[in-house]
Amino acid sequence: MVKALALASLLTLTACQTTTRGSFCDIASPVRLSDTAVDALSDVEVAKILAYNLKGAKLCGWKP
């Protein structure tokens, strides 16, 4: 009985997980903004986008 309950618990936990997984390079793409859009961003936002694009360049070979 205990084994059956444990098995049922494990089955419900695994049912919630997805089987579709992709690497960063499979699901991400570079952020490309116009000069006008860049001018409207704060310095913090520009830094975050730059860091994201640098990560993509390093991991995925994105070109500027």
Image: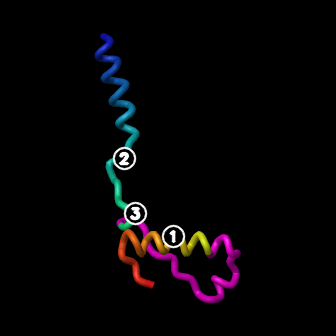
> What residue do we see at 70% from left, 75% from top?
42
> What residue do we see at 45% from left, 84% from top?
64
Q: Earlier in the sequence, mark 3 or mark 2?
A: 2
> What residue do we see at 35% from left, 36% from top?
14
> What residue do we see at 38% from left, 69% from top?
59
Asked if marks 3 and 1 touch (Cβ < 8 Å), the reply is no
Which kind of residue does numbered mark 1 sit on? Tyr
Q: Which mark is residue 52?
A: 1
Q: Which mark is residue 18?
A: 2
Judge whether residue 40 is colored magenta.
yes
Asked if marks 3 and 2 touch (Cβ < 8 Å), the reply is no
Q: Earlier in the sequence, mark 1 or mark 2?
A: 2
User: Could you say where residue 50 lies in the image, as x and y percent from the top left?
Assistant: 55, 75
Say which quadrant the N terminus sits in.
top left
Q: CA distance from mark 1 to mark 2?
A: 25 Å
According to the picture, the residue beneath numbered tag 3 turns out to be: 24
Give the magenta range.
Answer: 26-46
The furthest residue to the bottom: 35
Which kind of residue does numbered mark 2 sit on? Thr
Position of 12 relative to 40 (above/below) = above
